[in-house]
Image: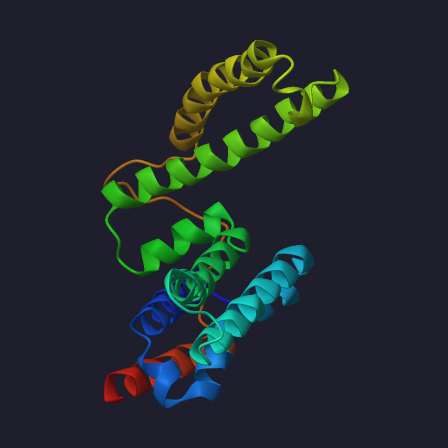
């Protein structure tokens, strides 16, 4: 299911806002459950099975804890801690999952094209695009460093036996990669013609489909119900 970034951004904001206030869950519990598990359905449709299963399992675990805490199965400090944990997970987890889905399923060219359609200024689009490219590249570099350490037998269980080697072999290459990546990303932005106040072409065509309009309407209905409740 392909959605425009504008739709995914709206869904991320609305789901986070609605669940954070908590009015919808109290007045429309079925709808609240649908909104809670909706981001994990999107992750599952994108074949992010591991993330979706872990997220659903965490949500169910938090719901069970909240249910038993409501039945006074826990008392005192334990009840307060259980309620705090379950509320944090249920109200913040789906929003974070929807944001992760939006980033995982949106290419940088699609992101820039959508932000252009939303009339964002170039002074904001350029730093955002450079920042996202930077963090993605750093993540890949860090994964390769971990794989190289694993081949040398430097796994996490060896940290207390060789702490200095673990720190040196992990963070020194990472710092060198950070310096190189910062220069590469800046040069990439310049070669792509990303400059403030200058028009540029793009291979991405940001268009809203019927599916986008459906989910936008659904999010607006949820937002109205939250305000009404």
In the displayed structure, 119 sits above or below 199; it is: below
x, y percent for residue 5? 44, 61
- Picture quarter containing residue 134? top left
Coloration mode: rainbow
- Picture quarter containing residue 183? top left
Q: Is residue 167 left or right of residue 221?
A: right
- Residue at the spot 59% in from the left edge and 67% down from the top edge: 56
Which of the pair 196/135 is nearer the observer? Answer: 135
Q: Is residue 142 left or right of residue 6?
A: right
Q: In what quadrant of the picture does the C terminus appear?
A: bottom left
x, y percent for residue 76? 37, 65
- Picture quarter containing residue 24? bottom left
x, y percent for residue 206? 44, 61
Is residue 180 among the parts visible in the rendering? yes
- Residue at the spot 44% in from the left edge and 81% down from the top edge: 32
Which of the pair 174/187 is nearer the observer? Answer: 174
In the displayed structure, 91 sits above or below 229; it is: above
Q: In what quadrant of the picture does the N terminus appear?
A: bottom right
Is residue 1 among the parts visible in the rendering? no
Residue extending farthest to the front is: 76
- Residue at the spot 76% in from the left edge and 20% down from the top edge: 151
Q: How many marks?
A: 0
x, y percent for residue 85? 43, 60
- Residue at the spot 50% in from the left edge and 76% down from the top edge: 68
């Amino acid at each position: 299911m392909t959605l425009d970034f504008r739709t995914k951004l709206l869904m991320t904001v609305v789901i986070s806002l609605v669940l954070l206030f908590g009015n919808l869950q109290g007045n429309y519990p079925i709808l609240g459950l649908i909104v809670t598990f909706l981001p994990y359905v999107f992750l599952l449709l994108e074949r992010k099975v591991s993330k979706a299963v872990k997220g659903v399992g965490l949500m169910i675990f938090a719901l069970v804890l909240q249910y038993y805490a409501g039945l006074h199965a826990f008392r005192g400090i334990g009840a307060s801690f259980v309620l705090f944990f379950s509320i944090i997970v249920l109200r913040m987890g789906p929003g974070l999952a929807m944001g992760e889905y939006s980033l995982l399923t949106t290419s940088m060219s699609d992101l820039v094209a959508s932000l252009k359609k939303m009339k964002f200024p170039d002074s904001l689009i350029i730093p955002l695009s450079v920042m996202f490219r930077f963090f993605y590249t750093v993540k890949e570099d860090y994964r390769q460093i971990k794989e190289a350490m694993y081949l040398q037998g430097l796994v996490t269980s060896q940290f207390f036996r060789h702490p200095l080697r673990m720190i040196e072999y992990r963070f020194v290459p990472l710092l060198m990669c950070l310096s190189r990546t910062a220069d590469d990303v800046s040069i990439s932005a310049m070669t792509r013609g990303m400059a403030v106040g200058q028009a540029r072409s793009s291979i991405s065509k940001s268009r809203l489909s019927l599916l986008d309009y459906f989910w936008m309407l659904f999010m607006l209905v949820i937002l109205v119900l939250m305000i009404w409740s």
